[in-house]
Amino acid sequence: MRVAAPEGALGRHVMHKVAWRLIPLLGLMYFFAFLDRVNVGYAALTMNADIGLSAVAYGIGSGIFFIGYVLFEVPSNVMLERFGARIWLARIMITWGLLSGAMALVQGPWSFYLVRFLLGIAEAGFFPGVIYYLTCWFPARHRARVMALFLIALPFSAVIGAPLSTALLGIEAWGLRGWQWMFVLEAVPTVLIGFVVLFVLTNRPQEAKWLSAGEKTWLVQELAAETAGHAQDHRGSLRRALTLPHVWLFGLVYFGILVGLYGFSFWFPQIVASLGQLSNMQVGLATMLPYLVACIVMVWWGRHSDATGERAWHVAGPPLLGALALCASVWLGQPLWVFVALSIAAVGIYSGLPAFWALASTGLSGVAAAGAIALINSLGNLGGFIGPAVIGFTKERTGSYGMSMLLPAACLLLTALMVFVARRSALRASQGSKAS
């Protein structure tokens, strides 16, 4: 078991300073990214009946976001490398915020599909752009814990968003229904934060006026030394990086994770509502609890991965737990135990993400890193379309949410196995490049 090398006082100070400067803002951005992406799950509690959406139409519309997202993912991340994170991330936030608010205007299935598709195009490149951006600031040995602090915004958006969104469903004013107010009011902060990013975010360490000359020199040299270790493996080439087998394998791993994550997230409020006679607010409070536990476990698991230097089992273990918990939810009849099983599934689905991105981004730098991370994210986000859509079809055919959980469970199980195939391919590529 490899343990991370000790770091001097200067290094610890610089990493602490950079983390406190960047992570709160990036985390807030991701909080609203995920909230604006999945708040449709809470809107569905009343929206589906208002505009005539069937389970199939809702599943397709929820997932069609990811078709637009995937189509524009790699070009968007390459544009981020060209224009800089400050300008491009601000552009992404402002446009997706406006389109998220436009969800209040949908009138039926086709307008629902259209706005969700455009929302995916607008947000394309945000998540892989931030992951790439973090690789420009943090050496590899720090990335799992840093990514855990960033990714905690994902389940935390449900902790806050669940009761907030369900509370907004109760608003009836100026001719707008509650779900329409929810989309508008949750979109406004996204647009405002986009303008903040435009004036606050720093593109690279070399431009950081908030670092002293000595701090800046240490960080630039650390990152340069790490990149130099991979200078002979052709990963500086975008074309080469996009054809590396392990990049595609990591994309398949991420696909399995996101089938489970989005299939679960988009349908969880409706599943909880089906377990008993609950008000919308009670559904929001109940769905908040699993995500709160997932936040805690995600940070602890990411720190544990960095402390031990182990990645593969830290990526594979959580999806395996999630798969077993989803299977258990199918066969448990008592609503309380079904909820407990689904809560454990949430912890499994989310907690392996920091270690995954730390493992998948190892050895990539520059425009090659931007393109490869975008490709992994694009392949993975196809699962964001498959998961919700298949659950919708299954629910329509069987009339039950239970059987619809088997597909995400199967994908999570295969994901756990694929992690080791992808890691072995990455090691072979690294050894082959060093030999040459």
Image (tube, rainbow, N blue to C red):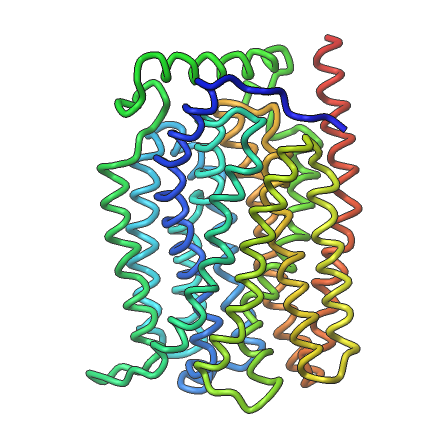
Counting the numbered discs, the total is 0
The image position of residue 137, as x and y in percent, is 44, 27
The image position of residue 103, as x and y in percent, is 35, 69
Query: 433 left or right of 172?
Result: right
Q: Which residue lies furthest to the top in this view?
A: 436
Nearer to us in this view, 103 or 426: 426
Residue 76 lies, with reference to residue 218, above or below; the image says: below
Q: Which residue lies furthest to the front in this view?
A: 9
Residue placed at 31% from the left, 13% from the top? 213
Residue placed at 32% from the left, 64% from the top? 186
Query: 284 left or right of 358?
Result: left
Nearer to us in this view, 116 or 192: 192
The image position of residue 111, as x and y in percent, is 39, 71
Nearer to us in this view, 135 or 71: 135
Residue 23 quadrant: top left
Position of the N terminus by quadrant: top right
Residue 107 lies, with reference to residue 192, above or below; the image says: below
Residue 128 lies, with reference to residue 361, above or below; the image says: below
Nearer to us in this view, 36 or 141: 141
Residue 435 quadrant: top right
Q: Which residue lies furthest to the left in this view?
A: 174
The image position of residue 193, as x and y in percent, is 27, 49
Position of the C terminus by quadrant: top right
Query: 373 left or right of 251?
Result: left
